[in-house]
C-alpha cells in the first residue's frame, strides 16, 4: 500500500497590497504503483478546481482607503477597456475565472487592478484567443464608442 499526498495552493493579489491565499492537501492510498501517475493527474485537477472555486469568493477586500468591503471596486483601466473586456467575456462565453487567472499569470494582479497599458495587452490576448483581429475589434469598438453596442 502506497500513500500519495498532494497539495495545491494559490495566492491572489488584491488592490491595496492585499492578497488572499487558499490551499488544499489531500492524502490517499494507492494499491498499485502503476496507478501513481494517473492518480496524481486526477488529484491535481481536483485540487486545482477546488482552490480556484474557493478563491472566486474572496470575502473581505480592502476598500479604496484600505479599510472596508469594496463590492463596487473600480477598475484601473479605462471605462472603454473595461467594457471591451466584459463584452469579450460575454460574447465568447469565456470562463471569468480563466480570464482572471490570465491577468494573474501575466501581471500578478487582479483583472480590476490592471493599468490601461496592461488592460490593452490583456485585451489583445483575449481577442487572439477568441480568433478575432485586434485591429478589427478595436475599430468596431471605437466606431460605436460603446462596449454594449459593439458587435
Image (tube, rainbow, N blue to C red):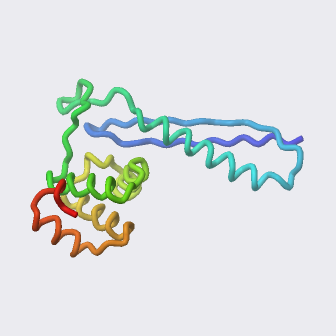
The C terminus is located in which quarter?
bottom left
- The answer to which of 13 and 91 lies nearer the viewer is 91
Q: Residue at x 38, y 53 (%)?
A: 99
Whole-percent x, y for residue 132 in the image: 32, 72
Q: Residue at x 75, y 49 (%)?
A: 39
Classify residue 87 by image quadrant: bottom left
Whole-percent x, y for residue 108 in the image: 36, 51
Whole-percent x, y for residue 64 in the image: 18, 33
- The answer to which of 126 and 19 lies nearer the viewer is 126
- The answer to which of 141 and 81 lies nearer the viewer is 141
Q: Residue at x 79, y 52 (%)?
A: 36
Classify residue 116 by image quadrant: bottom left
Q: Residue at x 81, y 40 (%)?
A: 3
Classify residue 70 by image quadrant: top left
User: Is 43 positioned to the left or the right of 82 in the image?
Assistant: right
Q: Hey, which residue is sitting farthest top in the picture?
A: 68
Q: As displayed, is residue 43 above or below residue 66?
A: below
Q: As displayed, is residue 3 above or below residue 38?
A: above
Count of all numbered marks drawn on residues in the image:
0
User: Is 51 positioned to the left or the right of 107 in the image?
Assistant: right
Whole-percent x, y for residue 52 in the image: 49, 42
The N terminus is located in which quarter?
top right
Amino acid at each position: 500500500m502506497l500513500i500519495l499526498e498532494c497539495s495545491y495552493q494559490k495566492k491572489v493579489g488584491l488592490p491595496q497590497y492585499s492578497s488572499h491565499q487558499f490551499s488544499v492537501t489531500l492524502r490517499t492510498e494507492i494499491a498499485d504503483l502503476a496507478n501513481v501517475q494517473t492518480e496524481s493527474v486526477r488529484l491535481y485537477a481536483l485540487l486545482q478546481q477546488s482552490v480556484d472555486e474557493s478563491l472566486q469568493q474572496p470575502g473581505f477586500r480592502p476598500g479604496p482607503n484600505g479599510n472596508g468591503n469594496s463590492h463596487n471596486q473600480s477598475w484601473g483601466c479605462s471605462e472603454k477597456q473595461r467594457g471591451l473586456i466584459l463584452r469579450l467575456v460575454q460574447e465568447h462565453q469565456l470562463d471569468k475565472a480563466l480570464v482572471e487567472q490570465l491577468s494573474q499569470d501575466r501581471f500578478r494582479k487582479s483583472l480590476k487592478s490592471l493599468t490601461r497599458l496592461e488592460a490593452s495587452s490583456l485585451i489583445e490576448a483575449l481577442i487572439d484567443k477568441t480568433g478575432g483581429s485586434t485591429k478589427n475589434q478595436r475599430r468596431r469598438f471605437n466606431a460605436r464608442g460603446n462596449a454594449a453596442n459593439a458587435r
